[in-house]
Image: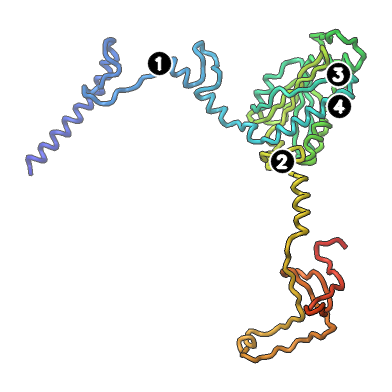
């Protein structure tokens, strides 16, 4: 027994000595340039330590080889961007923006008295702060409020579209590109004409949402500095619809931005997958169902009289027990479908059959007066 205890103590001392030797060996390996960095410090054949080089570290953090920011598809940047909600989760938005394109094409043709073509370039989602930093200047940013949803949206008009609209509305000659003058602020006339354009766009935008939800987009203010058009926190997610407006050889871009917080009141409606122009209604099926309902067999019960009795009297029923009814040959008979009384009539006979002649129809609780 004493020998076993002495052997255990000796093995414990050898293990501690090996650990101290390994710790001291790390310093020696650092001092020795020829030492193998993947070698086991204890001299055994255990697991080797994995050392990342600079390129692998940059790839993990999402940076390129030159020290700049990478494409954002890997590493920490991908983890950060994974918090964004993709607009495909709200498929009805595509239907809404398709309606905007069709309606806006007609409205802008009437507004400019020119041949206008509106196309939808893309629908993307991004962070609000990143979008403001990417707005090409000079531009005009219209802030509008969705009154029924109690939140705001943003409408961005680039410089090319601004000068094109001004040129068209003020009688510019066709066949010549709109003149673009840099280095000066927008004039009062240009701002007023752009506000009229924004009113037309917001009117059609609200009409496009009508089949889903009644909403009125009210124009609030017009800004030329993106910092003054902040309607949400920089980290909040938003949906951007990029529209292209062409007027023969003139035109430009128009972008509609809606934060996800603005769309929250109608999120359940936007989550619907398959809805046509009528948004869920099928007139052919409705007509077929209404026609077939007239041929449905319904069971009708003719109630002569009712008696309220105690449970004790019912349990005392025997063969031959008689229940006296208060009905007479001239009493009204109730015709019931399930628990609902539908008609009132009188008992009679038709040939060899007992029949009920309907006198009047009883109005239900949900029927109009």
* Label whose residue precedes the other's in the sequence (3 or 4): 4
* Label whose residue precedes the other's in the sequence (3 or 2): 3
Residue 352 sits in which quadrant? Answer: bottom right
| Disc 3 and disc 2 in contact, CB within 8 angstroms | no
Residue at (75% x, 44% y) in the render: 282
Badge 4 element: helix
Q: Residues within 10 Å of mark 3 (few under 14, many from 20)?
A: few
In this orientation, which residue lies closer to the viewer: 218 or 212? Answer: 212
Residue 208 screen position, x and y as percent: 79, 34
Which marked residue is nearer to the observer: mark 1 or mark 3? 3
Circle on res. 354: none
Q: How far is disc 3 from disc 4 in space, using C-alphas?
A: 11 Å
Residue 301 screen position, x and y as percent: 74, 73
Q: Quadrant of the C terminus?
A: bottom right
**Which residue carries the number 4 mark?**
107
Left or right: 280 in relation to 68: right
Residue 259 sits in which quadrant? Answer: top right
**Which residue carries the number 1 mark?**
53
Which marked residue is nearer to the observer: mark 4 or mark 1? 4
| Extreme-front residue of the structure | 351
Image color mode:
rainbow
Q: How far is disc 1 from disc 3 in space, using C-alphas?
A: 60 Å
In this orientation, which residue lies closer to the viewer: 270 or 231? Answer: 270
* Label whose residue precedes the other's in the sequence (2 or 1): 1
**Which residue carries the number 2 mark?**
266
| Disc 4 and disc 1 in contact, CB within 8 angstroms | no
Residue 27 sits in which quadrant? Answer: top left
Q: How far is disc 3 from disc 2 in space, using C-alphas?
A: 35 Å
Residue 244, compared with residue 273, is above or below; it is above
Residue at (86% x, 27% y) in the render: 107
**Which residue carries the number 3 mark?**
115
């Amino acid at each position: 027994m004493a020998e076993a205890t002495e052997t255990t103590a000796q093995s414990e001392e050898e293990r501690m000595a090996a650990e101290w030797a390994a710790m001291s060996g790390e310093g020696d390996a650092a001092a020795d340039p020829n030492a193998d960095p993947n070698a086991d410090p204890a001299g055994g054949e255990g697991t080797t330590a994995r050392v990342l080089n600079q390129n692998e570290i940059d790839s993990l953090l999402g940076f390129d080889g030159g020290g700049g920011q990478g494409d954002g598809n890997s590493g920490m940047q991908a983890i950060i961007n994974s918090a964004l909600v993709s607009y495909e989760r709200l498929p009805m938005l595509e239907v809404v923006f398709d309606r905007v394109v069709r309606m806006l094409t007609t409205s802008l043709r009437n507004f400019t008295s020119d041949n206008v073509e509106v196309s939808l370039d893309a629908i993307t989602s991004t962070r609000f702060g990143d979008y403001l930093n990417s707005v090409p200047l000079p531009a005009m940013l219209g802030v509008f409020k969705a009154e029924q949803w109690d939140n705001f949206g943003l409408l961005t008009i680039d410089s090319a579209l601004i000068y094109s609209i001004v040129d068209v509305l003020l009688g510019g000659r066709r066949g010549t590109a709109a003149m673009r003058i840099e280095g000066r602020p927008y004039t009062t006339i240009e701002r007023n004409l752009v506000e009229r354009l924004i009113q037309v766009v917001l009117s059609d935008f609200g009409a496009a949402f009508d089949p889903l939800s009644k909403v009125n987009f009210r124009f609030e203010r017009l800004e030329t500095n993106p910092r003054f058009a902040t309607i949400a926190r920089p980290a909040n997610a938003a949906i951007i619809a990029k529209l292209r407006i062409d007027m023969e050889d003139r035109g430009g871009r128009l972008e509609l931005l809606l934060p996800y917080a603005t769309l929250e009141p109608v999120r359940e409606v936007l989550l619907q997958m398959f809805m046509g122009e009528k948004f869920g209604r099928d007139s052919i099926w409705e007509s077929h169902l209404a026609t077939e309902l007239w041929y449905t067999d319904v069971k009708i019960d003719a109630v002569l009289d009712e008696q309220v009795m105690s449970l004790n009297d019912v349990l005392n029923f025997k063969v031959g027990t008689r229940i006296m009814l208060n009905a007479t040959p001239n009493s009204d008979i109730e015709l019931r479908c399930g628990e609902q009384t539908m008609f009132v009539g009188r008992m009679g006979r038709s040939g060899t059959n007992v029949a009920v002649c309907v006198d009047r129809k009883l109005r239900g609780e949900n029927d109009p007066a």
